[in-house]
Image (cartoon, rainbow, N blue to C red):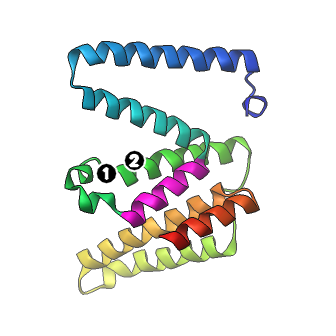
Amino acid sequence: MGAQAGISAIRRDALTWGITAGVALTAGIALLLVPVELVFGAVAALVAGSVFLVSPYAGALAFIALYYMRPMDFFPQLALLRIPLFIASITSTGLFVRLLLARQKLVEGWYVKWFLALWGAMLLSVPLSLYRSQSFSGAQDFLKSVAMVWMIYMAVRSEKQITFAVRMLGWM
């Protein structure tokens, strides 16, 4: 990964240790000032965000797991945090940056293009609908599915990853 980004291994290791020391120092100071739960949540969000930026595949799997298992239905307090939205935004940002750095196409695969075309048709039909707000809400909901298909398709890079994702979806 360092060779692709143009960062030498020594500088990458120093940067990693520097970031780790900074987060540890900040978390230690924060523990003196705010409740433990908030510090733990912030550190967990930073770690998860870093993992999802580096590995969009892990973010796509975490998004699918939270989207379908819906722990927010069992713990309503989690719904305020909007965890799937956080995961999807960090993952799509990491994937977008990775695709731009590798100079790859942002949209590949015929079914991703058809999903986008279908969503475009849905969006164009909203002004002619009798119930515009419900039609727009349906188009927004379908956009989540389009984004999920795009994330999965662009993040999966090996047959092993496909097998794991299919088994995980089958388990849910």
Tell me residue 92's x, y (percent): 53, 50
Residue that appears at 49% across and 14% down: 21
Q: Is residue 65 magenta?
A: yes
Q: Is residue 48 magenta?
A: no
Quadrant in which the N terminus appears: top right
Residue found at the far right of this picture: 3
Residue that appears at 46% across and 15% down: 22
Tell me residue 167's x, y (percent): 60, 68
Q: Is residue 85 left or right of residue 60?
A: left
Q: Is residue 15 left or right of residue 128?
A: right
Tell me residue 160's x, y (percent): 73, 60
Q: Considering depth in this image, is 86 or 61 the residue closer to the camera?
A: 61
**Bounds of the magenta span?**
56-69
Eyeballing the image, is 91 above or below 40? below
Q: Given contact means CB atoms under 8 Å apart, are the residues at marks 1 and 2 in contact? A: yes
Eyeballing the image, is 122 above or below 87? below
Q: Would you name the residue on which mark 2 appears?
A: 86
Q: Mark 2 packing: few (<14 Cα in 10 Å), some, or many (20+)? A: some
Q: Magenta-highlighted stretch: main secondary structure?
A: helix
Residue that appears at 54% across and 43% down: 52
Residue found at the far front of this picture: 171
Q: Would you name the residue on which mark 1 appears?
A: 82
